Image (cartoon, rainbow, N blue to C red):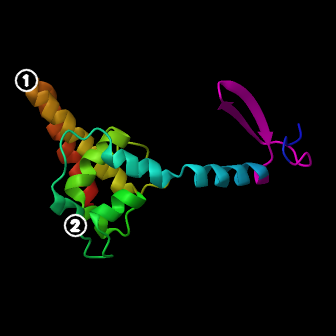
Amino acid sequence: MLCDICKKNDATVHLTEILNDQMSELHLCEECARQKSLAMEQQFGLNDLLAGMADFGKQEKEPETVAHIKCPGCGLTYADFKKIGRLGCGECYNAFNKYLGPLLKRIHGSTQHTGKSPLKVTKDLKKEMDIQTLRIRLQKAIQAEAFEEAAKLRDQIKEAEKKKEK
């Protein structure tokens, strides 16, 4: 199938657009899809979305001093972040931490990463993750007063920690 826009290349991207309650399908080649993507981002960018999310669902107005909080690394203010929707550097996470937490929770549903790990996770990191999982299971077993299970988990943790040290 040929691209609907250039009529030259094979269509590899298939879009469904809904405009004025009318649905239409577009079959695009990679280059035309890239151009369409840029046009859409100019019309409504990710920055606008993030900036809007920063204000979404607020129960009360932030104190004026919050807008003037400044990142020591790059000088970005919280007000500037809300306007552009992007942080300036890694230090911004620390500088705006108190206010980013609720925003990240609204966007991702959590403030902690719980997704997939890279394919080439180091053995040490994998072992540490396994130990953390065992510790969580241990806490749950203790809360449920399943002491036999808790004892087994405690022993597994000790064994895993010994292997990790070697």
Asked which secondary structure carries label 1, the reply is loop
* Residue at image location 29% in from the left, 69% down from the top: 91
Badge 1 or badge 2: first in the primary sequence = 2
Up/down of 152 relative to 123, above or below: above
The nearer-to-camera label among 1 and 2 is 2
Q: Which of the labelled discs sits on residue 19, or is there none?
A: none
Question: Could you tell me if the residues under marks 1 and 2 are in contact, i.e. CB atoms within 8 Å?
Answer: no
Please state the horizontal and vertical placement of residue 60, each as a whole percent of the image.
Answer: 18, 42
Q: Gap in Å between the C-alphas at discs 1 and 2?
A: 49 Å
* Residue at image location 19% in from the left, 55% down from the top: 98
In the figure, is residue 109 to the left or right of 97?
right
Q: Which of the labelled discs sits on residue 145, or is there none?
A: 1
* Residue at image location 35% in from the left, 61% down from the top: 81
Q: Amino acid at mark 1?
A: Glu
Up/down of 136 relative to 66, above or below: above
Please state the horizontal and vertical placement of residue 79, each as a whole percent of the image.
Answer: 30, 62
Start-end of magenta stretch: 6-31
- What is the count of numbered marks? 2
Say few, some or many: other residues with alpha carbon within 10 Å of mark 1 (under 14 / 14 to 19 / 20 or more): few
- The magenta stretch spans residue 28: yes
Q: Nearer the viewer, residue 108 or 25?
A: 25
* Residue at image location 33% in from the left, 76% down from the top: 74
Up/down of 149 relative to 103, above or below: above
Q: Quadrant of residue 28?
A: top right
- The magenta stretch spans residue 145: no
Q: Label 2, on which residue?
A: 68
Q: Amino acid at mark 2?
A: His
